[in-house]
Image: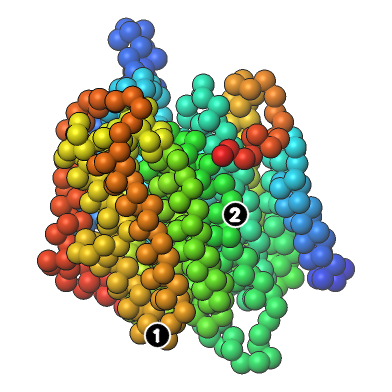
Amino acid sequence: MMLEHILVLSAYLFSIGIYGLITSRNMVRALMCLELILNAVNINFVTFSDFFDSRQLKGNIFSIFVIAIAAAEAAIGSAIVASIYRNRKSTRINQSTLLNK
Amino acid sequence: MFNLFLAVFPEIFIINATFILLIHGVVFSTSKKYDYPPLVSNVGWLGLLSVLITLLLLAAGAPLLTIAHLFWNNFFRRDNFTYFCQILLLLSTAGTISMCFDFFEQERFDAFEFIVLILLSTCSMLFMISAYDLIAMYLAIELQSLCFYVIAASKRKSEFSTGAGLKYLILGAFSSGILLFGCSMIYGSTGATHFDQLAKILTGYEITGARSSGIFMGILFIAVGFLFKITAVPFHMWAPDIYEGSPTPVTAFLSIAPKISIFANILRVFIYGSHVATLQQIFFFCSIASMILGALAAMAQTKVKRLLAYSSIGHVGYICIGFSCGTIEGIQSLLIGIFIYALMTIDAFAIVLALRQTRVKYIADLGALAKTNPILAITFSITMFSYAGIPPLAGFCSKFYLFFAALGCGAYFLASVGVVTSVIGCFYYIRLVKRMFFGTPRTWILYEPMDRNKSLLLAMTSSFITLFFLYPSPLFSVTHQMALSLYL
């Protein structure tokens, strides 16, 4: 179980999350990709803490905080998407949503 | 035991005020006996009062705050830098809250939670400024951003506002994710999250052989995350849309308070935490790009809030010049720039809020303001001239000092780009003034006189802008102390 393998996994998830966040047409999918980004960073933290920091476990503590914040962010994101849906009756991100000249 | 909390008295007070105001608002606005009153201006005045009392606790309790208690040393540190930054933050928050009361009345905006969220985000910004550990910094940044996502989307019926809230959420969460990835790489490569430990570990970065790719990636990602948050180019993605779509008081908050606290964090992380490992080139490039884009893109704008958004992007570019220098004069000029930028922006947004009665959105609506409200037109022109950098107003002093610092450390290209874009930017500021004084709108718009809060705020800030050049030395010595204490 080498360190680099897990780091590659978390970098892979991070890049999938970024790609999905930028290019998704569905608001809910964008929120899911956001969660993916934060969880990829959590994997990173826990891995580093396991390999290098067995005394203080700062990485594990940091990742617990990040989990809580990701949950709060998902709640707020869902609330905003719900209010957009009420106004617009669709959760589609298209050109008119993004570009607001 | 009591000494433990002396250092955080201001934060304890403002958190208690937040909770008490929240409970007060909920209990009384849902009570049938008082006929469900909308408590927004009640909670607003109490919120303003609590911000001012926090300012008093902070300013007058200064000797108590520099107790370097071992318990708090792990999370934050108070010194001269945080003292003055927090005073600036609380003053701008108080000014911005006092601008909002008229807005609540006119728009019939009944949600008292707006003020509660602003108080909560102010508390988190107080923590952000004094944060001394990557964990504390990230938590404070996230708390502040979460509060702002909600208030940016607070006008629930308007597509504009909810769209701006969603864009802000995606942009802010994206940048927090990138920042966090950078924190994880730094933690993994060095094993430390506290800035003291990071400073010691990263002093050996220049020695070849110690140049770790993990640290490089970490610093790069943290820098990119911060640059997203202060909406520097090329990371300014949706900033104009967010500024335009949110309700105007929220735009005022967005362009003042987070910038102050994120700049304070940038200074902590990159000057104290990793002085030699900093990627100075990225700030150099972003500063040039922001100045150029701020000058050029604002010329094509027809809406007032978008114009202010692009001009704030440009101003962030000027302020980043001070950071790219890397000398103490550079940091001092950055802090002077932030201070004057905060005051000018409060002024500009107070004017935009005052003109809101008849929904002025477009610049063309400002035509012939000089004939209907001459004093407002003069105040607006003073603010625009200060943004453009025309002597002897305060904006000129801040830009002068920034370019002076850039020349002093040999960044001649940066200073010349700054001067050229400043001149180009003058064009659209003066076009605004010209349209006010010499333009005729298609339909004449009569503006009601503004309320007392805004008029007091405008009087104070515009007199500061006009008279700053007579006695600039208090600000200069304050920012010099702040810059010095950053290096200790």
Q: Is residue B162 above or below residue B92?
A: above
Residue at position x 65%, y 48% in the image = A67
Observer able to see residue B355: yes
Callout 1: residue from which chain?
B
Q: Nearer the viewer, mark 1 or mark 2?
A: 1
Q: Is residue B373 above or below residue B176?
A: above
Q: Amino acid at mark 2?
A: Ser
Observer able to see residue B323: no
Residue at position x 58%, y 60% in the image = B234
Residue at position x 25%, y 48% in the image = B381
Residue B213 is situated, as x and y percent measured from the top left of the image, at: 70, 78
Q: Are marks 1 and 2 in contact (CB under 8 Å)?
A: no
Residue B120 is situated, as x and y percent measured from the top left of the image, at: 40, 42
Q: Which mark is residue B175?
A: 2
Q: Is residue B258 left or right of residue A75?
A: left
Residue B245 is situated, as x and y percent measured from the top left of the image, at: 49, 35
* Residue A61, quarter of the rendered image: bottom right
Q: Is residue B182 left or right of residue B355?
A: right
- Residue under circle 1? B409
Tell me which label, 1 or 2, sits earlier in the chain: 2
Callout 2: residue from which chain?
B
Residue B268 is situated, as x and y percent measured from the top left of the image, at: 44, 69
Q: Amino acid at mark 1?
A: Cys
* Residue B181, quarter of the rendered image: bottom right
Q: Is residue B448 left or right of residue A63?
A: left
Between residue B125 and residue B423, name the one nearer to us: B423
Give the CA distance from mark 1 to mark 2.
Answer: 31 Å
Do the dots labelled 1 and 2 sit on one chain? yes
Crowdedness of circle 2 by 10 Å Cα count: few (<14), some, many (20+)?
many
Between residue B358 and residue B115, name the one nearer to us: B358
